[in-house]
Every structure is written in structure tokens, then in C-alpha cells.
Amino acid sequence: MADYRNWRPEDIWLKIRSGEIDYPTAGMCGGYAQANLAILPRSYAEDFKEFAKKNPQPCPVLEIIEGDPMIHDMGEGANVVTDIPKYFVYKDGVKVDEVTDATPYWTEDSVAFLIGCSFSFEEALLQAGIDVRHISMGCNVPMYKTNIECEKAGVFEGPVVCSMRPMTPENAKIAAEITGRYPNVHGAPIHMGDPAEIGIADVNKPDYGDAVEIREGEIPVFWACGVTPQAAVERVKPPLVITHAPGHMFITNVKNTELNDYLEAKKQK
């Protein structure tokens, strides 16, 4: 697998669009924020917007796209239905398709939400000397449905989904301090230690992504995850929803170091 750590997002979009990249994006385009995706019918968009507002840690909205699938704030010139490596398509809450180009499913009625992703803070963890296990193992991050319920909004409800990274207790404290500086990409961990306390029966059997090695002396550390909308979709069962395949993100052309200030300034407009 090629090393895309130092590539520009615009060049990665082209490789994804051509089908050359169809695998998880962790570690690509170092320094740039990544985003999750949920595309819903317009009749569900207001409820989902309120759901995200009430649950900002798992669902921090970066940009809303409607009318056509072209992205603006998070990547001028990118296309939300072609520039993510893999998409899941749900009908009535059931996944019916996996595609690398979701163009046939986009309609004038579609509204897309780009949602902050924990891949965005991983560069800071690596710079602090903390091993990010799924990157070092070359696999997808493990993700789990928890027993923590999101705050309901309109028709939307469901469990918080968490991503997990194992590390020593000492590194977990450092990681919490680092990721707390990234509130628009899930922020600090929501749980450390015993997975059973948040309803995870077997940490070696994730609901999404891949299991990773947890070494002696390490604890699992859990962050709220942007796959949470997919769990809500499974429960709410809208007629048609398109999401990113877990771990297959949109790579924005906004730097991680600038994202929070950019979004805060946008809120003030």
C-alpha cells in the first residue's frame, strides 16, 4: 500500500475518484482534517441537524451540502459522492449496497452532512510519541456500539458509537489532554478502561472496523465516533441513506490546526 502521508488532499481526491484508492484513509494527508458522511432525504434533514446539535461529541457537523453534491467549505472542487473511497447505502435501515461511487443514489432531494472524524487528531497523538495501533498495524480502527444513548431529536435516536485506541494509562492521560483541544473532531475520550461499563461485551469483536492488539499494561481508550449516525439510521430506518464506509473518510483541505478556529468563526457569521 502506497504511503500517502505527505500528499495533498486534492491529489488524493483524484486517486479516489479514479478508483485507485478504495481502502481506509487513516494516516493519509498528514495535517488535514478528515470527515464522516451522512446523506439523507430532505424530509429528514432538519431532524438530523437537530440530532447533531444535541449530540455534538459524536456528530460535530463540519459542512451541510444540498442542491448538488459539490463540497465547498471543506474542500472546494471535491464531490461528496465520488471522493470518498467507499460508501454504504441503506434502504429502510438495512444496508443494501457498498459502492465506490454513490452518484446514482444522489437526487435533488439529497442533503449531505460532513461530520468531524477522530482520524483528524491522530497526527497530534503520533507527534506526541503515542502509538496509534490501527495505523501501526495497517488496518481499520475498531468501532463499537455502546450502551450510551444519544439525546433524541425528532425521529433520530440511537446508541453512541465509539472508536478505540489502546495505550498505557500514562499515554491515555496525555491523549485525553491532546484530543480535548479538538472539540470539532470528537474531543477528549468518553471512556477509558473496562469496555463492559459502556456495554461492549468483547473488545476483540468490534461492530465496525478491525480488532487491534491490546498489549500487556495497556487499556482501551474510547472516543465518540462519527459512525454514530449509521447506528441511528439502522434504528430509525429512513427510506434512503448514504454514508461513508467506516474508516473510509473524506479528506478535507482544511488543516487540523485551523479547523476549530475556522468553524468557530463560521458559527459567528
Image (cartoon, rainbow, N blue to C red):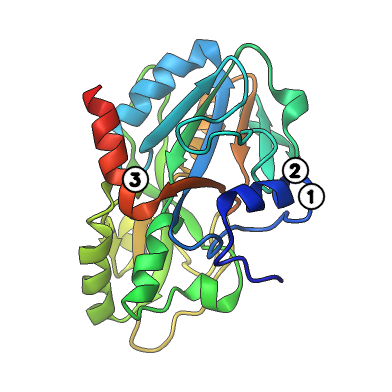
As helix, strand or loop, the secondary structure at mark 2 comes to: loop
Which tag, 2 or 3, sits closer to the chain's start? 2
Answer above or below: position of 7 versus 137: above
Answer above or below: position of 224 versus 5: above
Q: Nearer the viewer, mark 2 or mark 3?
A: 3
User: Where residue 26 appears, x then y in whole percent?
Assistant: 54, 62
User: Where residue 145 appears, x then y in whole percent?
Assistant: 45, 50
The quadrant holding residue 247 is: bottom right
Question: Which numbered circle lies on residue 226?
Answer: none
As helix, strand or loop, the secondary structure at mark 3 comes to: helix
Amino acid of disc 1:
Gly
User: Where residue 65 appears, x then y in whole percent?
Assistant: 52, 23
Of 31 and 82, the residue lying toward us: 31
How many numbered marks, from 0 up?
3
- What's the CA distance linking mark 2 and mark 3? 27 Å
- What's the CA distance linking mark 1 and mark 2? 7 Å
The residue that mark 1 highlights is: 19
Q: Residue furthest bottom?
A: 216
Which tag, 1 or 3, sits closer to the chain's start? 1
Of 187 and 228, the residue lying toward us: 187
Q: Say whether residue 233 is visible.
A: yes
Which tag, 1 or 2, sits closer to the chain's start? 1
Tag 1 near tag 2, CB within 8 Å: yes
- What's the CA distance linking mark 1 and mark 3? 28 Å
The quadrant holding residue 127 is: bottom left
The residue that mark 2 highlights is: 100
Q: Residues within 10 Å of mark 1 (few under 14, many from 20)?
A: some
The residue that mark 3 highlights is: 259
Q: Residues within 10 Å of mark 2 (few under 14, many from 20)?
A: many
Amino acid of disc 3:
Leu
91 with respect to 28 (left or right): right
Q: Nearer the viewer, mark 1 or mark 2?
A: 1
